[in-house]
Amino acid sequence: MNIVILAAGMGKRMHSGLPKVLQPVAARPMISRVVETAEGLGEGKVVVVIGHGGELVRERLAGDPRVGFTLQPEQLGTGDALRCALPLLDESDPKTLVLLGDVPLIRTETLSALCREAEDGIGLLTVNLGNPTGYGRIVKVCGSVRRIVEEKDATPEEKKIREVNTGIMVLPTRRLRDWAGRLTNENAQGEFYLTDFIGFAAGDGVTVRSTVAADPDEVMGVNSKRELAAAERAFQRREAEKLLDAGVTLADPARIDVRGMLECGQDVSIDVGCVFEGHVKLGNRVRIGAYCVLRDTEVANDTEILAFTHSDGASVGEEARIGPFTRLRPGAQLGRETHVGNFCEIKKSTIGTGSKVNHLSYIGDTTMGAHVNIGAGTITCNYDGVNKFRTEIGDDAFIGSDTQLVAPVSVGRGATLGAGTTLTRNAPEGKLTLSRARQVTVEGWQRPQKKASK
Ligand code: UD1
Ligand code: MG
């Protein structure tokens, strides 16, 4: 089967500098979603018609050997777009499936059912909408499809028709040249409409079988930011339902956003307002507090991530407790039973089993052993403005509050650093090290007094 995706339109109604089909749903361009769904049919090559912002679209899809491109030089309508794809089609293949780059939520299963039902005629995917505004209406006579009339060309009577064109159709390849040649642009928009093929088919005695899509969300067309937002919500609802069906507890399925892949073990629970990006893996019994953002992060069994935690490129071991208000940056590897608390930032560092960084600290480029206690306000000074240096902290070390570790530097096993230390040389094992001006009390000192005015 030939597959063509129409993606040349500008998308005026978006009011955006970004071509419409590159507008993202769940962080991926709509066109990438449609291409992936089309490839799911296992039919080989997919032809994408590009035009407005074509180079950007091509760039975005480059590297996928199954995608071919054809340029529609001027955006003269969907019928003209398909005409531009004709030279790339395999004429010996009886069926051509047409998809729209702005109908992003379509599923592969729906397409394969449509293709089966088309037989040697036309298979038209339609949908019944409570509010059909903006869509082409399906005009039927005695139950069979006669033509499609676009919103702008429809009479008040036709506008009342609730069954609309999703834009997705399977067409008999051998008829396409003839029908494309018969298109005119004598209509309200002055465009060559692909939808006119349906009228030609009915006139030529080619059967048009319409299949009503069961789920209107799946065939939603996205022409404006309002519709883009609606598609995003529909997509997220679908993701939330998949998680619920797999046994994940969601405090509110309407308040979670999955913009990538989220894998969950058993008895995971997720509070409201969380965002998952890239590839996130949560082990068994992991609890995620409200308003966390996790990206490319792995969390092991029985760990709790408390509210407002932000994590990117990190991994957290079993039975750990992170947050609230923790920031984990790329390369943060937290061992089992670690605690990292409020206003702590960890970057490119290993934190050993049971170690605690509970308050207001920055740990970067550090290797920390097990059962270390980091006092409030500890900073690893890892950067001299040009170079990065590492800090090493041995097992059971105790770092007093408000300490700066000026890297490269190491703290021996079981060492203690006094509060307020600025450590510039290595601290030996098992001993107390501190750098601190000696405290003095000045006897007889008096506060300055205000002179009484005369
Ligand atoms: C189209 C259908 C309408 C259907 C609706 C479903 C036509 C004439 N109308 O309307 O019946 O109900 O989709 O969402 O087909 N495109 C090109 N080249 C062009 C014009 C458009 O490649 O010259 C591409 C666009 O990038 C887009 C798709 O075709 O991906 C549909 O075009 P759009 O302008 O959005 O058509 P609608 O008004 O939504
Ligand atoms: Mg559209």
Image (tube, grey):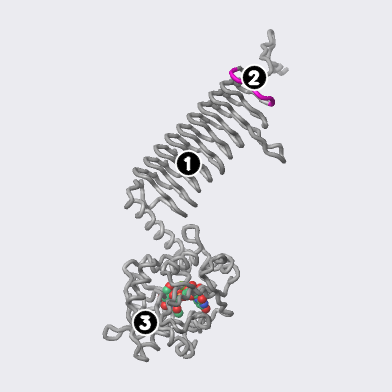
Q: Which mark is residue 434?
A: 2
Quarter of the image for the C terminus: give it. Answer: top right
Q: Could you say which is closer to the camera, residue 90 or residue 382?
A: 90
User: Which element carries disc 1, helix, strand or loop?
Assistant: loop
For badge 1, the amino acid type reads Phe
Q: Could you say which is closer to the camera, residue 350 or residue 383?
A: 350
User: Which element carries disc 2, helix, strand or loop?
Assistant: loop
* Category of crowding for the residue at label 2, using alpha-carbon neighbours closer than 10 angstroms: few (below 14), some (14–19), many (at least 20): some
Q: Of marks 2 and 1, which one's residue comes earlier in the chain?
A: 1
Q: Of marks 1 and 3, which one's residue comes earlier in the chain?
A: 3
For badge 3, the amino acid type reads Ile
Give the residue pinned by disc 3: 122
Question: Which residues are drawn in magenta?
Answer: 424-430
Q: Are marks 2 and 3 in contact (CB under 8 Å)?
A: no
Q: Of marks 2 and 3, which one's residue comes earlier in the chain?
A: 3
Where does residue 208 sit, x and y in percent of width and height? 34, 83
Where does residue 167 sit, x and y in percent of width and height? 42, 75
* Residue 361 painted magenta: no
Q: Name the outermost residue toward the left.
A: 142
**Residue 157 visible within the image:** no
* Category of crowding for the residue at label 1, using alpha-carbon neighbours closer than 10 angstroms: few (below 14), some (14–19), many (at least 20): many
Give the residue pinned by disc 1: 308
Q: Is residue 393 left or right of residue 223?
A: right
**Separation of marks 2 and 3 at Cα, in angstroms:** 83 Å
Whether the residue carrying mark 1 lies under 8 Å from ligand 2 is answered with no
